[in-house]
Amino acid sequence: MDVRQAITDRIIAMLEKGGNVFRERWTRAASRGMPRNGKTGAPYHGANVLLLWDAAIEHGYASNVWLTYKQAASMGAQVRRGERAVLCAHFERKAMRNPGASEIDSSASGASHGEGEGDASDRGHDGRSGVLLCTPFWLFNVAQIDGLPASTALPAPDRQAWADGSAIEGAMRFIGGCHANIQHGYLRAAYSPSADRILMPDVDRFTSPQAYCATALHELVHWTGHEKRLNRSFGQRFGDAAYAFEELVAELGCAFVLGHIGLVDATIEGHAAYLDNWLQVLRNDRTAIFTAARHAGEAFEFILARALP
């Protein structure tokens, strides 16, 4: 089974529904918290997050808690007959210390039950040569399982209770906490890497305060990629498509942020034109979505760690 291609095809099908459709689905699912494993409590990462979010909205699941069939059985529960699982990907590096000897280095794949890794490089994090293996695993939502103990309840989203409880305040705490250089008075929103500066139209030029916050957060994800921060660069791998790919990273990273703060109805203005480019990148590279989702997750964690209290 070509797991990368199967999952890439799923993501392409989501994107083909149109920008407003997949963006709304992902952010609404994200407002319930990041997908987590119901037995270990570990969060899922990368492209697996997108797949689980989409399945939760598609089937109307109230919970973002998931289990494998064996995990459910080990807890004395049973997946209902006829229920369908969500295909996810687990990455693991098979590292070679010496010729003829091999071992599995499971720490390279991150959290158990599937880390959204994507770069099939021939060297591991410790410098050992090897192959990054992608294996499938399947998850069921707790809504598909009977007999689970009460302790497998939906965990509350990891969201701080801000003073007025509004998503707008949450967005401004994220934006302010990063201390990015943001300048207003421009015709359109953009991030300038050479000046390390976010350029924004004045607030009253946006259709709503929510749209302003969403657009600013999108540019803030770009800002995290500067060489002084996460140092993202895709030119060597994607060539002319590198700019479009960075936009995909920003789209996904912004979805993570918007969902986390509950800003689910916002519109990112001026970014609808990139959809065809994203589709072209994903159709040409079956590993691209894993790389984009991993970088988006890193950007989200970077912004989250700097939010004002």
Image (spheres, rainbow, N blue to C red):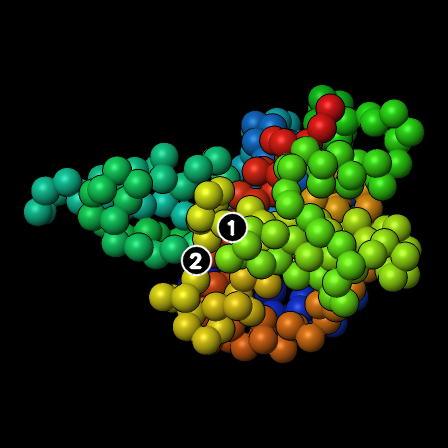
Label 2 Cα crowd, 10 Å radius (few <14 / some 14-19 / many 20+): some
Q: Position of residue 184 (x, y in %)?
A: 76, 54
CB-based contact (under 8 Å), mark 2 and mark 1 = yes
Q: Which residue is mark 1?
A: 225
Residue 162's image quarter? Answer: top right
Q: Residue at x 28, y 44 (%)?
A: 124
The tag on residue 233 is 2
> Is residue 7 among what the camera can see?
no
250 relative to 166 in the view: left or right:
left
- Could you tell me which quadrant the N terminus lies in? bottom left
Above or below, 138 against 18 in this view is above
Front one among 80 and 164 = 164
Element at label 1 = loop
Q: Residue farthest to the left? A: 99
Which amino acid type is shown beneath numbered disc 1?
Gly
- Between 63 and 215, the one nearer to me in the picture: 215
Disc on res. 187: none
Q: Nearer the viewer, residue 127 or 269?
A: 269
At 73% across and 24% down in the image, what residue appears?
Answer: 309
Q: Amino acid at mark 2?
A: Ser
| Residue sitting at x 71%, y 28% | 308
* Left or right for 251, reference 128: right
Tell me residue 181's x, y (percent): 64, 45
Specify whether residue 165 is in view. yes
Give SS at disc 2: loop
Look at the picture and state if 124 lies above or below 236.
above
Q: Is residue 75 above or below residue 58?
A: above
Residue at the (77%, 41%) spot, across then down: 171
